[in-house]
Amino acid sequence: MNKYYIFFALGVIMYISSCQTTRFPQGEAAYLAYCASCHMEDGKGLKTLIPPLAQADYLQKNSEDLACIIRNGLRAPIVVNGQAYDQPMAGIPNLSDVDINNILNYIKNAWGNDYGTIKLSEVQAQLEGCK
């Protein structure tokens, strides 16, 4: 009888652990709702029109600008992984500071990215300094 409890407990543990697919579930949900239509669910972007976020050097090199880009958009040409992109990106001004923080932590750690995390206070400081 005890071995059945063990199998049951293992089954429950496996089920629960399979429910969470990311370290940043709120960020993933917000990304899918607001960003994936352009940058794609897998973060690979859209060929030469929309830059990738997956393994994108731009995320590391411009970390201090990312919150402002999400909030206000981007109209200047950029280079990501050696590829130039000049398609304007619309901002999402209705996102809260917390939503932006969650999205940033998700994209900085999804799709093989290992770019660390950002604190809410850092996001808020970036947003206060947006041009």
Image (spheres, rainbow, N blue to C red):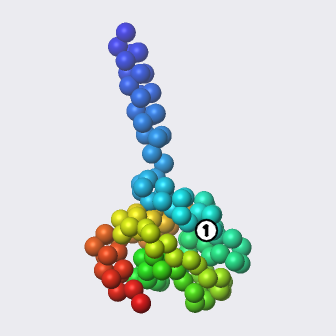
Q: Crowdedness of circle 1 by 10 Å Cα count: few (<14), some, many (20+)?
A: many
Question: Residue sitting at 30 percent across and 80 percent down?
Answer: 125
Whether residue 45 is situated above or below residue 30 in the rendered picture: below
Residue at the spot of label 1: 39
Whether residue 121 is situated above or below residue 40 in the rendered picture: below
Q: Nearer the viewer, residue 4 or 90?
A: 90
Asked whether the viewer can see residue 69, the reply is no
Query: Seen in the image, is 66 located left or right of residue 77?
Result: left
Three-letter amino acid code at the position of disc 1: His
Whether residue 67 is situated above or below residue 84 in the rendered picture: above
**Quadrant where the image shows the N terminus:** top left
Question: Residue sitting at 32 percent across and 76 percent down?
Answer: 124
Q: Secondary structure at mark 1?
A: helix
Q: Name the residue furthest front.
A: 94
Whether residue 23 is situated above or below residue 83 in the rendered picture: above
Q: Nearer the viewer, residue 114 or 124?
A: 124
Asked whether the viewer can see residue 93, the reply is yes
Question: Residue sitting at 56 percent across and 77 percent down?
Answer: 90
Q: Where does the image place residue 77, in percent across and percent down from the top left?
A: 61, 89
**Quadrant where the image shows the C terminus:** bottom left
Q: Name the residue furthest right.
A: 47
Q: Where does the image place residue 101, in percent across and percent down from the top left?
A: 38, 67
